[in-house]
C-alpha cells in the first residue's frame, strides 16, 4: 500500500480502471436482467469513463479533466439508479459525496455538495423518505467535511510547536529569531562575542524548477548535513528564507567566523550533486555593532541576506 501512495499517478490509473470495470459489470447486469430502458445511462457512462482513462494516460492533458468526468459519472449514475427506482437505498447518496471530497479540494467539494443538495428531493425514493433523509445526508456530509478541518488544525498545532523547518534539519525562522535573541542578550549581559554567518544557496530555485522538489530537498539536506557536522553543538543553524540560512555562532569573534566560513566553503565545494554538480554557497559574516539593539541587528541581517541573493557581476 505504501508503494502505491508514493506513486499517486499510478494510484489514480488504478482508480479509473476499477471504476470502468465496475460500471461495465453494472451495464452487463442490467442487460442480463432485461432492464433495456435503464441500460442507456450506464452504457453512456462506460464510454465516458473510457475517455477519462485515455485522458489520464495522456501526458499532455490536465488531471482536472479526467477527475471532472469521473465525478460527473458518479452523480449521473446515482441519479439514474434512483430515478428509475433500481434501488430504494439512500446509502448510494454517499457515493457522489465521497467522490467529491476525494477528487476535489475541500472547499470546492463542500460547495458542490451543498449546490446539489436540492436535486435529491426531486427523486422518487427521497420524496418518500422526507423525515429520514435530512439527518442521514447531514451525517454523511459532516463525516466527509469535518476530518479535513481537524487534520488542518492538527497540522497547524504541530507546526506551531515544532521548532524545526518542515523541509530540512534547521530551525524554523520563528524559533531561529527567538534563539538568536537569547544569544544576543546573553552576549550583551556577559560581554561575550557573537557572530552570524549568512548562507545563500543560488542553485536552490533553479534545481526545483528544472529537476523538481526531490532535488531541492536533496540540496537542503546536503547543506544542513555539511554545516551541522562541522560546527559545535551549541551553534544554531536556521532557515531564514527559502534559500537563505543563518548560522549563529556564540562566543565567536570575527576572525573565528571567517575561519568557519572558509571551512564551510571547502566542505560545500567538495559535495557534488548528480543533477547540479558541486554545491555552491554564498557565505557572509555579520557581527553586532556596539550599543546596537536586537531589532536593528535583525533588520541588518535581513538586508545583508538580500545582498547575498543578488548575482555577482
Image (spheres, rainbow, N blue to C red):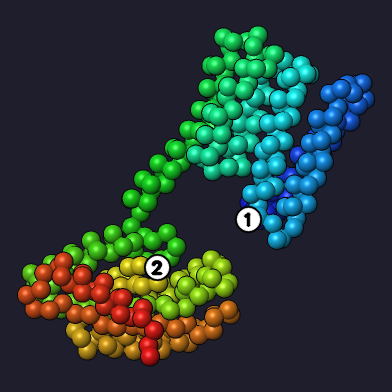
Label 2 crowd (10 A; few <14 / some 14-19 / many >=20): few
Residue 222 visible from this viewpoint: no
Q: Position of residue 233 (x, y in %)?
A: 30, 72
Res 103 → quadrant: top right
Q: Nearer the viewer, residue 24 or 163?
A: 24
Q: Would you say residue 45 is visible in this rendering?
A: yes
* Residue 246, percent from left and from top: 30, 73
From the image, tell me which residue sits under label 1. 6
Residue located 65% across and 9% down the image: 128
Quadrant of residue 191 in the image?
bottom left
203 sits left or right of 41 in the view: left
Write the residue at 19% across / 80% down: 287
- Measuring 71% from the left and 26% from the top, which residue is drawn there? 78
Percent across and percent down for residue 171 are: 34, 64
Q: How many marks?
A: 2
Q: Nearer the viewer, residue 222 or 294?
A: 294
Q: Earlier in the sequence, mark 2 or mark 1?
A: 1
Position of 80 relative to 149 (above/below) = above
Q: What's the mark number on residue 242?
A: 2
Give the camera-side residue of 310 and 233.
Answer: 310
Determine whether, in the image, residue 292 is placed left or right of residue 278.
left
Q: Determine contact: label 2, label 1, CB under 8 Å.
A: no
**Can you give x and y, in whole percent of width and height, for residue 8 in the image?**
65, 53
Question: Is residue 192 found left or right of 303 in the rendered image?
Answer: left
Q: Residue shown at 52%/74% (left/top)? A: 207
Q: Quadrant of the C terminus?
A: bottom left
Q: Is residue 215 above or below residue 6?
A: below
Instruction: Report the mark closest to the observer, 2 or 1.
Output: 2
Callout 1: helix, strand or loop? loop
Q: Is residue 44 left or right of residue 119?
A: right
For label 2, the SS is loop
> Label 1 crowding class (10 Å Cα cut-off): few <14, some 14-19, many 20+?
few
Amino acid at each position: 500500500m505504501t508503494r502505491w501512495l508514493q506513486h499517486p499517478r499510478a494510484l489514480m490509473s488504478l482508480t479509473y480502471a476499477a471504476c470502468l470495470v465496475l460500471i461495465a459489470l453494472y451495464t452487463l447486469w442490467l442487460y442480463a436482467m432485461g432492464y433495456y430502458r435503464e441500460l442507456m445511462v450506464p452504457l453512456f457512462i462506460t464510454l465516458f469513463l473510457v475517455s477519462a482513462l485515455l485522458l489520464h494516460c495522456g501526458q499532455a492533458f490536465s488531471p482536472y479533466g479526467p477527475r471532472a468526468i469521473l465525478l460527473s459519472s458518479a452523480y449521473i449514475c446515482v441519479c439514474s439508479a434512483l430515478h428509475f427506482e433500481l434501488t430504494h437505498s439512500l446509502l448510494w447518496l454517499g457515493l457522489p459525496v465521497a467522490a467529491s471530497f476525494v477528487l476535489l479540494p475541500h472547499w470546492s467539494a463542500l460547495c458542490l455538495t451543498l449546490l446539489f443538495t436540492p436535486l435529491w428531493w426531486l427523486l422518487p425514493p427521497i420524496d418518500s423518505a422526507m423525515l429520514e433523509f435530512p439527518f442521514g445526508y447531514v451525517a454523511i456530509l459532516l463525516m466527509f467535511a469535518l476530518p479535513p478541518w481537524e487534520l488542518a488544525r492538527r497540522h497547524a498545532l504541530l507546526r506551531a510547536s515544532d521548532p524545526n523547518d518542515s523541509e530540512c534539519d534547521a530551525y524554523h525562522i520563528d524559533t531561529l529569531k527567538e534563539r538568536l535573541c537569547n544569544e544576543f542578550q546573553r552576549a550583551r549581559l556577559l560581554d561575550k562575542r557573537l557572530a552570524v554567518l549568512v548562507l545563500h544557496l543560488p542553485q536552490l530555485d533553479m534545481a526545483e524548477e528544472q529537476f523538481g522538489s526531490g532535488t531541492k530537498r536533496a540540496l537542503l539536506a546536503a547543506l544542513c548535513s555539511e554545516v551541522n557536522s562541522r560546527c559545535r553543538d551549541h551553534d544554531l543553524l536556521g532557515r531564514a528564507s527559502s534559500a537563505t540560512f543563518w548560522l549563529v555562532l556564540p562566543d565567536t569573534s570575527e576572525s573565528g567566523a571567517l575561519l568557519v566560513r572558509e571551512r564551510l566553503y571547502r566542505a560545500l565545494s567538495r559535495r557534488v550533486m548528480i543533477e547540479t554538480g558541486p554545491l555552491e554557497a554564498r557565505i557572509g559574516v555579520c557581527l553586532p555593532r556596539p550599543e546596537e539593539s536586537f531589532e536593528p541587528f535583525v533588520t541588518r541581517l535581513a538586508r545583508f541576506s538580500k545582498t547575498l541573493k543578488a548575482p555577482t557581476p
